[in-house]
Structures are given as structure tokens and as C-alpha cells.
Amino acid sequence: MPANIGIVGLGLLGSAIAYRLLEARFLVTGYDPLVQRSDALIQLGGTVATAPEPVFTQCSVVVLSLPTSEVVGKVLSSVALARGAVIIDTTTGDPRDAEKHAKTLRSAGGVYIEANVAGSSVQIRNGEAVVLIGMDDSQAKNQHYGPNGDLVESVLTAIAPRRFIIGPVGAASRFKLVHNLLLGLHRAVLAEGLNFAESLGFEPQTTLDVLRETPAASAVMATKGNKMIASEYAPQATLSQHLKDVRLILNLADEIDASVPLSAEHSRILARAEELGWGGQDNSAVIEAYRNGKFSAGE
């Protein structure tokens, strides 16, 4: 009989992971407080729990895909963690929280694995994303996922064929922030460039098509360029979620005395877009901060 894998958090990323697991012929039991998300899992062929607790009691491997690491802590403290339980946490959060969660799991006889996703929900669904792994020191050195290693390996392979073990717990979250710094700035630069070109009188689609053939081309042009041009912001990953990540980047940079002036400016641009009402839309809506005449850099 196929293994039953739990998922807590059925938003954009969680629902894409559920799809991948079901496609790989796993059973999936999920929980989300929003009824429409639970209904979507049922339509995919999964089973819905009415609270987090049954997910942890029915499934030896549980994937967490939650808004923040603080929410992860609340969920873990609200359930009974069985000895041998494996938690695969895909939440982008504070690396120090991940280290605390790992300690909680160890004390309960379980295993905590960071599995930070480098890619959008669409890229996960299409098998195009990369997963960054953080594990206990001994596991990371041996590149082994613990007592249920074969099952965990199968689950991670179903989620994303391409994975990198970054190091101990906390390392993957830190590396994910490096990734998100670069990716987010690529989007902001594309938004600024397209808006600048349009202000100069260049036709947007032609601008994008030409830029794709030049040294200025980037993968972000392929994933976000047409969305920006068409003002089509069906979310693959929300703007507010990325603003949360940029604030984590700034906090971490402050702690280690790293210079990130572009990220500081980026946070102001994203905050402006959020103020304009674009927070729940795709992160490509950052271009709306530029299109709004009241926005100016450094305000």
C-alpha cells in the first residue's frame, strides 16, 4: 500500500507539493484552515484532516508549507510528535527558528529536515524547482535522511528531482535567503527596466523580446516578463511573501554586519507595492510600484 504523506499548509506551494506527491502515487492527507484549499486537495485526490493533529498521527512523514517559521513553531507545539516522526519543512523562515524546530524534534525522537524550495509553485508543479536541504550534522555529512531514509528520499524526489544538501539545519534557510535576495532583485530590475523603456516610448512586448536576445537576458524575463507587461498577476508566489523574505534578509544582514543596500531599497519598493494593494498578487506586481506616479526611490 502506498505511504500516506501528510501536508500542513495547502497554499500555493503546499498544494503544488500535494499535486507532485499524488502524481507519484503517494496517499496524501492534508490540513489547511481555509476550506477552499482543503476542497482543492480533495479534487486532486487527497484526504483532508480537520486539524493538524490527525495529520501527525496518521502520517510518519509530514511536510510543512506554512507562511512563517513562527507558524511552524505554533503547529509543532500544538501536536503530539511521535518517536520516529519525520518533518520536512518547506517554509521560508528565520534560520534560528529552524534550529529550534530541529531541537524540538530531536527531543521527541523525531527528525527535522529543512527543504527550502528555490522556485515558484508553478515550477514545483512542473518539476522544475530546486530544493535546498538542511539536516543534522551527522546526517548531512553522510547525506542520509535518517531512519526512514528511503521513504524520505522518495518523498523529496517526488517534490523536486533536483536537490542540494547545503549543510546542517539552518544552513538551507540561510542559503534560501541568498537565493531570494538574487531572484527578487532580478524581478525588481526587470520591472524598473520595463517601466523605463515604456516611459521612453518603447512598445513593451518588443522591448522584452529584444532584451531576451541580449546579454541582459535572465530566467526572470521568461517567468515574469509577460506577466508584468500584461498586468496579469495570478499568484505563483505572492508579493507580500517576498517582502517578508526581504525583511528576513535585512535582519540577518544586520546581525552579521553584511552590507545589502540594494535589498534595503528593494524592501521599500515592495512595501510601496503592498501599500497600493498588490500584496496578495504575484510578486511580478512589483512593477506597479514603478507605474504609480507617486512612487520614487528612497522615499
Image: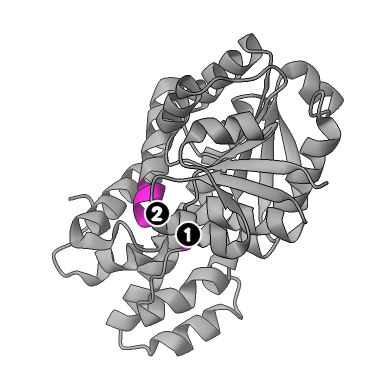
Examine the rendering and report whether any part of residue 77 can be seen: yes
Name the residue type under label 2. Answer: Val
Q: Are marks 1 and 2 in contact (CB under 8 Å)?
A: yes
Colouring scheme applied when the structure was drawn: one colour
Residue 202 picture quarter: bottom left
How far apart, in angstroms, are the residues tagged by discs 1 and 2?
6 Å
Examine the rendering and report whether any part of residue 259 can be seen: no
SS for callout 1: helix
Identify the disc placed on residue 39.
1
Drawn side of residue 199 relative to residue 197, left or right: left
Drawn side of residue 1 relative to residue 182, left or right: right
User: Mark 2 = which residue?
Assistant: 35
SS for callout 2: helix
Instruction: State the residue in front, 98 or 180.
Output: 98
Residue 136 part of the magenta-drawn span: no
Magenta: main secondary structure equals: helix
Query: Alpha-carbon neighbours of circle 2 within 10 Å: few (<14), some, or many (≥20)?
Result: few
- Residue at image x 40%, y 85%? 204
